[in-house]
Image (spheres, helix red, strand yellow):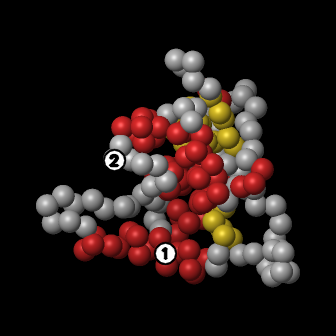
C-alpha cells in the first residue's frame, strides 16, 4: 500500500457528479479510493434528457480526430463512473495519471471488500425526492442507464 490511505466508498444513492468530484479531490491528495456499487449511483434529470446526452456521447465518432481515433463509449456502470472521474483530473500531467491509477471502481461488492465498512460522502448523497423549491427530482441509476444504452450489467 506504500503508506497511502485507503478510502472505500459505497456509491449507493450518491449523485454522479458530486461523488466524482469528491473522489477526484481525494485522488489528488494521494489517497487510494475504491468505489463499490457503482451501478447504484444516481444521475439526476429526466430519463429522456439523460439518455439523449449519453446517446450523443456514444454516437459522436465523427468528432474524433482522423489521425488518432478516440471514441468515448463506456456502457458499463463502473466504466461510466471511472470516465467521469478521469475527466475531472489533469490527465495529461503525471500527477493526474498517477492519481487515476489509485482509483478502483466496482459494480457490486467484490469478496476482498466484503468485510470492509464503506464510508458515504454526505454532501453527495441523494436524500430526498423533492428539491428545496418543492419540485419532484427526476433521476435514474447508472445500472438503468447502462441497460438503456446497451451495456452489459452483471447481476451480483
What residue is drawn where x is 75% and y is 54%?
Answer: 123
Labels 1, 2: front one = 2
How many labels, in total? 2
What residue is drawn where x is 57% and y is 18%?
Answer: 3
Instruction: Work out whether 122 lies above or below 58.
Output: above
From the viewer's perspective, is 89 left or right of 70?
Answer: right
Q: Nearer the viewer, residue 99 or 155?
A: 99
Q: Is residue 105 visible?
A: yes
Instruction: Work out whether 138 lies above or below 86.
Output: below
Among the 4 quarters of the image, the one containing residue 136: bottom right
In the picture, the quarter occupied by the C terminus is top right
- Residue 6 picture location, percent across and down: 62, 28
Hey, which residue is sitting farthest top in the picture?
2
Tell me the tag on residue 92: 2
Tell me the tag on residue 53: 1
Instruction: Work out whether 48 lies above or below 63.
Output: below
Instruction: Work out whether 98 lies above or below 20.
Output: above
Tell me the tag on residue 31: none
Amino acid at each position: 500500500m506504500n503508506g497511502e490511505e485507503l478510502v472505500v466508498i459505497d456509491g449507493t444513492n450518491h449523485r454522479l457528479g458530486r461523488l466524482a468530484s469528491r473522489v477526484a479531490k481525494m485522488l489528488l491528495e494521494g489517497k487510494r479510493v475504491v468505489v463499490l456499487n457503482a451501478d447504484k449511483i444516481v444521475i439526476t434529470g429526466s430519463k429522456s434528457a439523460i439518455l439523449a446526452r449519453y446517446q450523443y456521447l456514444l454516437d459522436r465518432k465523427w468528432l474524433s480526430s482522423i489521425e488518432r481515433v478516440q471514441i468515448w463509449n463506456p456502457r458499463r456502470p463502473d466504466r461510466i463512473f471511472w470516465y467521469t472521474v478521469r475527466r475531472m483530473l489533469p490527465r495529461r500531467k503525471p500527477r493526474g495519471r498517477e492519481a487515476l491509477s489509485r482509483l478502483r471502481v466496482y459494480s457490486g461488492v467484490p469478496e476482498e471488500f466484503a468485510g470492509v465498512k464503506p464510508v458515504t460522502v454526505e454532501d453527495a448523497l441523494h436524500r430526498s425526492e423533492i428539491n428545496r423549491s418543492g419540485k419532484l427530482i427526476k433521476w435514474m441509476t447508472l445500472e438503468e442507464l447502462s441497460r438503456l444504452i446497451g451495456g452489459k450489467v452483471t447481476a451480483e
